Amino acid sequence: RKEVEQDPGPFNVPEGATVAFNCTYSNSASQSFFWYRQDCRKEPKLLMSVYSSGNEDGRFTAQLNRASQYISLLIRDSKLSDSATYLCVVNRDGATNKLIFGTGTLLAVQP
Amino acid sequence: GAGVSQSPSNKVTEKGKDVELRCDPISGHTALYWYRQSLGQGLEFLIYFQGNSAPDKSGLPSDRFSAERTGGSVSTLTIQRTQQEDSAVYLCASSLSGMITDTQYFGPGTRLTVL
């Protein structure tokens, strides 16, 4: 079983749709959680950190459930430019900044 | 300011040859990480440098892989006697320090193809 698991998709949604991605992690010692975005043949870029209380950045909302070891990302009012692979990322343990990446969820927003 | 840079952007080599990949972190960042991304796979942690501390090499897949960081800045990842399974994109990242809350900024990667 992978340390970070995501549905690979693809998620094909029309512009303006709301889409949600989920992710589970296996190491209960993980302390930091992130969503990264990776465009085709580009490097990953931090989209947002994920906090226990949940956090929002414009059209993006991230939530963390430590008890279930579950992370989610909600994108509202999808734009064509949101098309990318979304990577769920956790740190390996509470003491280091080694990141463990999920394989990513591919989102394709259609006109 | 300038981001993380890596060179070369692409490298094609023959099986059995050695390759060196270079990473220039963001100026002032003390932590540097190497990852690799194989086709259809997530990023895989390889090695981590933090300041003058001994590097964390726990992710290196074999003793053919080594890395060094000179002067606390530029890093070189060396793969000896390359194999076809080494083909991947090698990504370098840096962060201000090694704190678990620090954002890691990635370079554009080196795409390695072993024929």
Image (cartoon, rainbow, N blue to C red):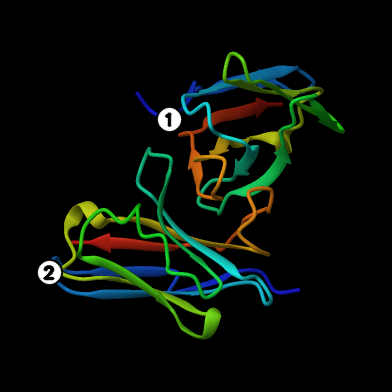
Among all residues in the image, which is located at the extreme left?
B16
Q: Which amino acid does label 1 sit on?
A: Glu
- Separation of marks 2 and 1 at Cα, in angstroms: 32 Å
Q: Which of marks 2 and 1 is in front?
A: 1
Q: In the depicted view, which residue is nearer to us: A29 or B81?
A: A29
Residue B22 x, y percent position in the rendering: 44, 75
Q: In this view, does B25 lie above or below A16?
A: below
Does residue B41 appear to the left or right of A54 in the view shown?
left
Give the total of numbered labels: 2
Are there few (<14), some (14-19), or many (20+) residues within 10 Å of tag 2? some
Residue A56 x, y percent position in the rendering: 84, 30
Q: Residue A47 sits in which quadrant? A: top right
Does residue B69 appear to the left or right of B16 in the view shown?
right
Q: In this view, does B5 lie above or below A85?
A: below
Q: Mark 1 points at which residue?
A: A3
Residue B33 x, y percent position in the rendering: 49, 61
> Circle 2 marks a residue in which chain?
B
